[in-house]
Image: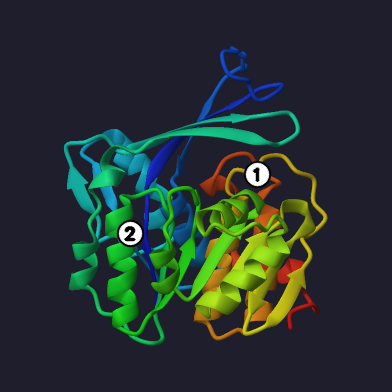
Amino acid sequence: MITVFGSINVDFVTRVDHIPAAGETVLGPDYQVFAGGKGGNQALAAARAGASVRMVGAVGHDPFATIGTALLKQAQIDLSPLTHHTAPTGAAFIAVSAAGENAIVVASGANQLAKAEQLEKLTFGPRDVLLVQRELNDDETLAAMSFAKAQGARVILNAAPAHGLTADWLSALDIVIVNEVEIADLAKILLWPLTSPDDIAEKISTQYSITVIVTLGAEGCISWSDGIRRTIPSLPVKVVDTTAAGDSFCGAFAAALDRGLGLTGALQHGAAAGSLACQTLGAQSSIPDKDAIEKALEGQVI
């Protein structure tokens, strides 16, 4: 069982020629509305990759809550741990460039009212996974991680964003997933004069006895665990929108671990899911299912 403690948003997406600079206005032809939020995206990615998933978070008493949870319900994710509040459901405003790059502003809304105590009504054990990000209140997220780890569950943190993270987070998890920017932020937080993602990942893994995964976009990902370096390539795809690529990686990776694959196989599933997600506009609309992932990896999984 995978439990996701994370955000649920509604995404407003517009296509633009380029990402605007500070003070610049850029016109887009229209906009589309999608379900999103890193928590919801990763929960859906894990479910579509074949895992049993429950979602812990908070939404508002508004129509956006229905939009934000529609695909989660369709994927048979257990939403009973969600709480509902007078604060509005979270929203994200996303500009996607012609090159497929994006810039995102998130209005947290009800997400900041999610509480770690919601997990106390659930059961956890050594075969369970808690997957968290950093779009909720930091104190509540860290408390949720500590609670699940104390119950014997495996804790995965997607440290997105990484700024403001403190070293004690690294003691409350088993696996941390970051991108190139976020791993550099971790080096600054730890006061390490390192610039190479590879070197930083190796040192964090060694010092904190955890698995460190760095996603590298089109170059795939690297990981360090127990002194072993792994590198996994991405799939060659035409990039339309990278919005949910990282979330697809995290969800599919967690689902692969949940069904018993080793670290290398789980990384392959994550990298494939992240690549496939880049081919479609939107967040949850782009997340691939188990069949698509396995077809892309046919004959390759270790």
Element at badge 2? helix
Q: Position of residue 205 (x, y in %)?
A: 58, 75
Residue at screen point 52% across, 48% down: 284
Q: Is residue 39 above or below residue 16?
A: below
Number of residues whose C-alpha sits closer than 10 Å to that of mark 2, classed few (under 14), some (14–19) or many (20 or more): many
Q: Is residue 74 visible?
A: yes
137 or 91: which is nearer to us? 137
**Image vertical order of residue 168 relative to residue 36, above or below:** below
Of tags 2 and 1, the one toward the viewer is: 2
Number of marks = 2
User: Secondary structure beneath disc 1?
Assistant: loop
The residue beneath circle 1 is 242
Instruction: Specify whether 64 is left or right of 121.
Output: right
Q: Is residue 184 above or below residue 221?
A: above
Q: Residue at x 40, y 55 (%)?
A: 72
Residue 231: image location, x then y, percent: 76, 71
> Does 118 sit above or below residue 210?
above
Disc 1 crowd, CA 10 A, few/some/many (<14, 14-19, 20+) = many
Residue 37's x, y, as percent? 43, 46
> Residue at horizontal 58%, vertical 32%?
103
Q: In the drawing, does residue 70 fall left or right of residue 261?
A: left
Of the residues shown, which amino acid type is indicated by label 1? Answer: Thr
The answer, for residue 256, to whether it is visible in the render is no
Quadrant where the C terminus is found in the figure: bottom right
Q: Return the disc, 2 or 1, that comes first in the chain's sequence.
A: 2
Q: Amino acid at mark 2?
A: Thr
Quarter occupied by residue 228: bottom right
Can you identify the residue that label 2 sits on? 141
Instruction: Indicate the quadrant containing the N terminus: top left, top right, bottom left or bottom right.
Output: bottom left
